[in-house]
Image (cartoon, coloured by chain):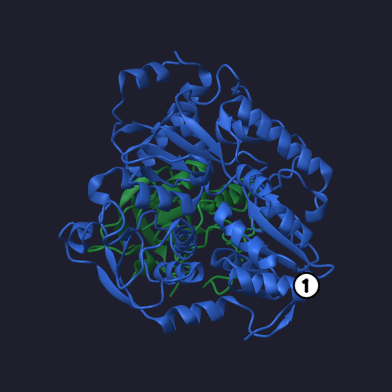
Amino acid sequence: MRKNTVIRARGAMGPTVEGTVMVCPNSIQGWYGIDVKTGVITEKGHVHEGESIAGKILVMPCARGSLGWSNYFHNAFLNGVGPIGYVFTRMDSKCATTILSTETPCVADFDLEQWDPCKDLRDGDYVRLNGDTGEITILQPAD
Amino acid sequence: MAVKLSAQEQAMLRGELGPAKKLALEKIIRYAEILGAGELVTITKAHLDCGVPNSYLGDLYEYNEVFTKRFLDPTGEVKLTEEDGFWEDLYIQDDVTPCDHHQWEIVNQPKELFDGNQALLQQASGCGVCLASTCAPYLTGWLPLRDEYFVTVESSNVLFCNSILGARGNGGGSATTFLSCVCGRTPKAALHLDENRLGTHVFNVQCKTETKQDWDMLGYAIGKRLDQDAIPIVAGDFKNPDLTRLKSFFTTLATTSGVEMCHFVGFSPEAPTLEAALGCKEPKAVFDITQDIVDGYRKGLSHPESGPVDLLQIGCPHCTIDEIRRLARYMKGKKVKEGVRLFIETTYPILYMAQTSGYAKILEEAGAHMMTSGCINTIRFMTEGVKGVGLSAGKLAHYQKSELDVPVYYGTDEEVLDAAVAGYWEVK
């Protein structure tokens, strides 16, 4: 049913990338949230605690907590364990700093009346993210 | 969307103001495109991290190597110099660092790291940064006033300046703040615009708002209930906070949420009334904050069983001189237990005041360590080998619970001081 579904928003950084989705409906905290050497989420009680963001397409509503937020993702990127794509329901300055620093494909600023990426995309979906056009296509749904 | 540029910005982009400014502006324009912003604004105040970055594992403590290469030019060709450094008309002050300003042994640090940090700070100063090494730069005169544009790397500071001073700024992060310091510009977006500064969520305060800890937990509770893009409005029955209470409130609000502005009805400049704070719109949500709610968070932040503590810290954000005066009065004639480290964190202009006023001597005679330039979250190696930690800031307790595998206790300043004397945290 969800195979080949397309959701759209603003393309914030190209080009196109394909990968597996990890949805963090409550974002990831901005300090001690991830281990930048391994990409593993260390925030206690996080829905994906103990899992790695490396090579994933991260789906989050926005940033959360400290302004150190972008540093964690930048460092994970420099260590080769960052996500390969980002989807933000709403772009903010911490998210934008992360995208600028890591030059990672990104789609953001969804019209919530049409699509909510934190609900329309699910953990394990294999998707194509086009950071130029803002299109995200579900190539292989998780379920 | 093309970003509109002024004549000076176009000249900068042509390289007429030097290669560093050209490259920084190119990146700030890219930042504007990522944000979806159509123009730039000139900033007048910036608050930048200049010490050894937390993640930096190199042993070369050269400013351009550590920062310029990381944020501006990975090839290392473009460098900041005293002649072509940060934007000249900009008042830049530095944030906390991973080292104290005077001491290294007491926090288990190698001398090389301490010296490297000092070297980086001196080079930053040479490029135009005023050194104070504090998370609360408003305590030392760095104060963007109404409608001034600012950038900062400190989440509680962005809240303070937008909400209380009526200045206009967005957080961003280290990379974009550094770039703004070079070219003096930031994208006009988010809280720079009137329509984005209206309150969205109303909080009817029904809990106590007397003490610093009351406000610390109120900020924590409000942040827990906020959506993205939210601007909370503190309403209902609250006692007007002072600077000490506000700085605690903003640190916890910025811990449990990502908000960068907050209104206080009848108190903060853009909220003379609830209707004005909302811009006559309906709130997205209304919450009551009861005493039960904040009591729940206070208990949740603190380890449930009594036990030994050997590291305690007060001063998040950095202590005001009045806080230090109160701590000295409480500790006069008492003694911190042997083997226990009690750190009072502030900024060195205020430490100088504390020394001049005699408060530092009283606290040091009691066995406390007067510290500057960091805190338990930033000072590297500080927590190595500890058995139990006691803190009076919800922000620090929240993050240290994530970081440490030993008991972390949260209480008032007085409870922290009592625990330092006893070497033991008694859960009541």
The quarter of the image holding the C terminus of chain A is bottom left
Q: Viewed as shown, does residue A107 lie left or right of B251?
A: left
Q: Amino acid at mark 1?
A: Lys
Q: Note the chain letter of the green one.
A: A
Please identify the quarter of the rendering in which residue B84 is found: top right
- Colour in which chain B is shown? blue
Secondary structure at badge 1 equals loop
Nearer the observer, B369 or B73: B369
Quadrant, the N terminus of chain A: bottom left
Residue B316 visible from this viewpoint: no
* Pointer 1 residue: B387
| Up-down relation of residue B176 to residue A110 (above or below) | above
- Comparing B217 with B59, the one in front is B217
Tell me the residue at 41%/56% (across/down).
A87
- Identify the residue shown where x is 29% and y is 31%: B2
**Image position, residue B426 (x, y; %):** 68, 83
